[in-house]
């Protein structure tokens, strides 16, 4: 069987690495029905939602705090067509701007080159955001996920004050020795969340993940269609929820349109 990693959490959940049919993942038992309802109202699938330190992990790699869960869902956001490029309501402001990124030395040293490749992919687009790797004091810190973490990587969305989400956690024990281009794709995906990209296939995540359709809804963080990007499935987007083992997803033309539109 082809391995499917839920990046979607890009590789959202370690279990997904081993078998696609295990997508259901987590026992919902540790997430209350009230929390499940709030997650759905915020526009995310609650399938596979799990409790993590300080909040919840949804769609495999997106962190929502308790405070996030208690935001009032917006009812005015548009949701148009399916499998397009979507971004959240909050974006990084104050552009042009340099975003610094650090990576922990507790992660495999090979990930540094993968991060540099991810940052180079963004910088090649000539955006109003320039990414720069630094050793400390970064806007976005990439750290090793705690032992036993049930996801491959996690991130969140920009703050209401226009700053990128500040933390990416990487479960190197679960990712293992994927090719540099695959790790670069994962890191570029998580950075995409930090600057406001939702999953490309958020309306029907089975497109990249397999399994049953899951409508991730709209939310206070928003799912607003980016003009000029397609209404049909886009098999190559770096923001698809799931990715196959060994796969590489450099920005395709639709991704570039979306990046250029926002930044
Ligand atoms: Zn994701």
Image (cartoon, grey):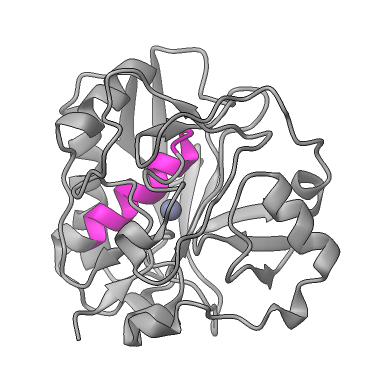
* Number of marks: 0
Residue at point 75%, 82% (across, down): 29
Query: In the image, residue 116 lies at what x, y percent?
Result: 22, 47
Magenta stretch, residue numbers: 183-197
Q: Residue 217 at x, y = what percent?
A: 59, 44
Q: Residue at x 53, y 52 (%)?
A: 215
Residue 188 part of the magenta-drawn span? yes
The residue sitting at 18% across, 37% down in the picture is 120
Q: Residue visible at 41% across and 71% down?
A: 106
> Along the line of sight, which residue is nearer the eye, 210 or 132?
210
Asked if residue 211 shows in the view, the reply is yes
Residue 89 image point, x, y percent: 58, 26
Indicate whether 97 appears above or below 117. above
Q: Main secondary structure of the magenta part?
A: helix
Q: How far across and down, in percent of the image, does residue 110 sit?
A: 21, 66
Magenta span includes 72 = no
| Quadrant occupied by the N terminus | bottom left
Q: Quadrant of the C terminus?
A: top left
Compared across the picture, whether 197 is left or right of 119 comes to: right
Any part of residue 128 in sight: no
Given residues 70 and 126, the one toward you in this image is 70
Give above or below for 203 relative to 17. Answer: above
Q: Nearer the viewer, residue 64 or 54?
A: 64
Splitting the image into 4 quarters, where does residue 70 fall? Answer: top right
Left-right relation of 65 to 5: right
Nearest to the observer: residue 103 or residue 64: 64
């Amino acid at each position: 069987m082809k391995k499917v990693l839920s990046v979607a959490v890009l590789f959202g959940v370690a279990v997904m690495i081993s078998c696609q049919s295990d997508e259901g993942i987590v026992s919902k038992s540790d997430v209350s029905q009230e929390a499940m309802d709030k997650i759905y109202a915020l526009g995310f699938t609650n399938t596979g939602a799990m409790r993590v330190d300080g909040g919840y992990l949804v769609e495999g790699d997106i962190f929502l705090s308790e405070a996030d869960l208690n935001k009032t869902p917006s009812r005015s956001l548009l949701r148009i067509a399916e499998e397009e490029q979507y971004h959240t309501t909050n974006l990084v402001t104050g552009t042009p701007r340099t975003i610094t990124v650090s990576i922990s030395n507790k992660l495999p040293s090979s990930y540094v080159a993968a991060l540099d490749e991810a940052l180079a992919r963004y910088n090649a687009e000539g955006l109003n955001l320039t990414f720069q790797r630094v050793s400390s004091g970064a806007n976005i810190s990439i750290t090793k996920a705690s032992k036993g973490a049930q996801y491959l990587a996690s991130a969140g969305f920009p703050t209401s004050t226009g700053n990128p989400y500040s933390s990416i956690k990487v479960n190197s024990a679960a990712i293992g020795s994927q090719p540099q281009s695959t790790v670069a794709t994962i890191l570029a995906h998580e950075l995409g969340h930090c600057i406001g990209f939702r999953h490309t296939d958020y309306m029907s995540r089975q497109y990249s993940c397999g399994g049953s359709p899951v409508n991730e809804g709209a939310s206070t963080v928003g799912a607003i269609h980016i003009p000029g990007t397609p209404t049909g499935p886009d098999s190559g987007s770096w923001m698809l929820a799931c990715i196959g083992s060994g796969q590489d997803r450099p920005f395709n033309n639709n991704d570039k349109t979306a990046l250029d539109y926002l930044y």
